[in-house]
Image (cartoon, rainbow, N blue to C red):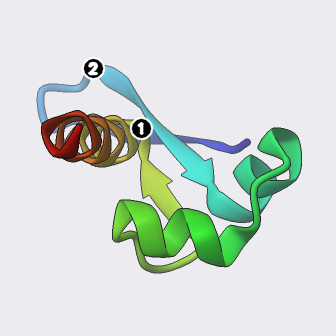
Amino acid sequence: MSTQMTKKSEGHIAQEERVNLENLAEVSGVPLEYIKNELLLDGEEVSMDSLRASMLKHLDDSFARS
């Protein structure tokens, strides 16, 4: 998984974590297309915050159906 460094305007260095979806699929053993379809993700990478939000929404929706 990759991490990207960005520099804020105040001069502080912030670390924005990015997750490569192909790597996530490989590590988790879940097909890439399934991850993208179920979590409604697009592209090759996603921020960790976006991934967490998508996963929580998916879990909430799944439990609501039960």
Q: Which residue is mark 2?
A: 12
Instruction: Give the residue drawn at x 45%, y 57%.
Output: 46
Q: Residue furthest front?
A: 66
Ranked by sequence position, the earlier of labels 1 and 2 is 2
Q: Which residue is mark 1?
A: 48
Rendered location of residue 2, percent (x, y): 69, 44
Q: Which numbered marker is on residue 28?
A: none
Secondary structure under tag 2 reads loop
**Image quadrant in which you'd find residue 63:** top left
Say whether residue 32 is left or right of residue 65.
right
Instruction: Give the residue drawn at x 72%, y 48%.
Output: 24
Q: Is residue 1 above or below residue 37?
A: above
Rendered location of residue 50, percent (x, y): 30, 47
**Measured Cα–Cα span from mark 1 to mark 2:** 20 Å
Say whether residue 23 is left or right of residue 55.
right
Position of the N terminus by quadrant: top right
Q: Amino acid at mark 1?
A: Met
Rendered location of residue 62, percent (x, y): 28, 43
Position of the C terminus by quadrant: top left
**Badge 1 density bin: few <14, some 14–19, many ≥20, Cα 10 Å:** some
Q: Is residue 13 above or below residue 23?
A: above
Q: Amino acid at mark 2?
A: His
Instruction: Give the residue drawn at x 51%, y 71%.
Output: 36
- Of 40 and 2, nearer the camera is 40
Say whether residue 8 is left or right of residue 21.
left
Instruction: Give the residue drawn at x 76%, y 66%.
Output: 31
Secondary structure under tag 1 reads helix
Q: Is residue 4 above or below residue 46?
A: above
